């Protein structure tokens, strides 16, 4: 991987790296989260909308965009010139209107094995912890780890805890979890070290679907408490 100059870009230009001969990576190293949250979805959508014959995929990351291309259909120089125009245009844009989705989550003793400990570490009751989670507008920063797994920013700092020292061998599909300042939802059963706070029945990934991933970078996600409240507390969390 080697860095290349991206010509004629404005302030906050990304560092461009050539990944072999079939991909370019744009990295906004050290950029503020607010800038990356605005810039990266804009760049991804703008490049996809161009439908360049040589571009095979556009992959967003936390602070990067990777452009996979067919080198026999375009030169690196020509692609970089196009990317330069896209980046300059996106820096002048406001954040695109984000799609907002509400995901129902059960917070019960069976589905929330780490909820009591997480609430206690924040010095709050379980109902207050659930209410806090339900008040957050999480943003999808990237999809990764497993197909359809969303990395969600916006988790309140009082709930920032490290991953478990000993990961679970199996985390149930649909588990809503937190770790290291992020939230996420496991799309399928897999090993994992995040702290499990609830569970949803919403399907996040369908391999044969027209759009396999339910969520995409830039989406806003709201958590809606659903079903009986965590065991040991009265009341419910919705219908």
Image (cartoon, rainbow, N blue to C red):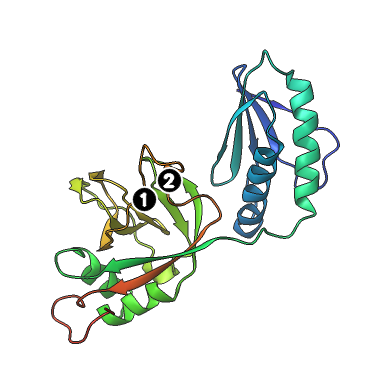
Q: Image point 71% across, 40% down: which residue?
A: 14
Label number found at residue 204 = 1
Q: Image point 68% across, 25% down: which residue?
A: 53
Residue 11: x and y in percent read 80, 48
Q: Image point 68% across, 41% down: which residue?
A: 49
Q: In the displayed image of the protein, which residue is found farthest to the top?
A: 72
Residue 195: x and y in percent read 27, 58
The N terminus: image quadrant: top right
Residue 103: x and y in percent read 37, 64
Asked if residue 125 can be seen in this view, the reply is: no
Count residues near mark 1 (Cα–Cα under 10 Å), then give few for <14, some for 14-19, many for 20+.
many
Q: Which residue is mark 2?
A: 213
Label number found at residue 234 = none
User: Is the C-beta separation of discs 2 and 1 under 8 Å?
Assistant: yes
Between 53 and 21, the residue placed more toward the observer is 53
Q: Is residue 205 left or right of residue 95?
A: left
Q: Is residue 70 above or below residue 100?
A: above
């Amino acid at each position: 991987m080697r860095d290349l100059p991206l010509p004629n870009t404005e302030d906050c230009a990304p560092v461009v790296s050539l990944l072999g001969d079939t991909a370019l990576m744009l990295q906004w190293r050290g950029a503020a989260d607010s800038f990356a949250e605005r810039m990266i979805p804009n760049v991804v959508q703008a490049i996809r909308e161009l439908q360049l014959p040589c571009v095979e995929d556009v992959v967003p990351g936390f602070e990067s965009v990777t452009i996979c291309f067919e080198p026999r259909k375009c030169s690196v120089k020509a692609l970089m010139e196009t990317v330069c125009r896209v980046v300059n245009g996106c820096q002048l844009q406001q954040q695109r209107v984000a799609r907002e989705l509400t995901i129902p989550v059960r917070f019960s003793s069976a589905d929330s094995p780490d909820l009591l400990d997480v609430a206690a570490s924040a010095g709050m009751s379980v109902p207050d912890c659930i209410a806090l989670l339900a008040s957050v507008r999480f943003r999808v920063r990237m999809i990764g780890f497993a197909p359809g797994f969303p990395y969600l920013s916006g988790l309140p700092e009082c709930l920032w805890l490290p991953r478990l020292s000993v990961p679970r061998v199996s985390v149930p599909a649909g588990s809503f979890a937190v770790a290291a300042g992020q939230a996420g939802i496991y799309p399928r059963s897999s090993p994992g070290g995040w702290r499990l706070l609830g569970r949803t029945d919403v399907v996040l990934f369908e391999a044969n679907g027209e759009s396999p991933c339910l969520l995409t970078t830039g989406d806003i996600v709201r958590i809606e408490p659903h079903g009986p409240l965590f065991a040991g507390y009265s009341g419910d969390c919705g219908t």
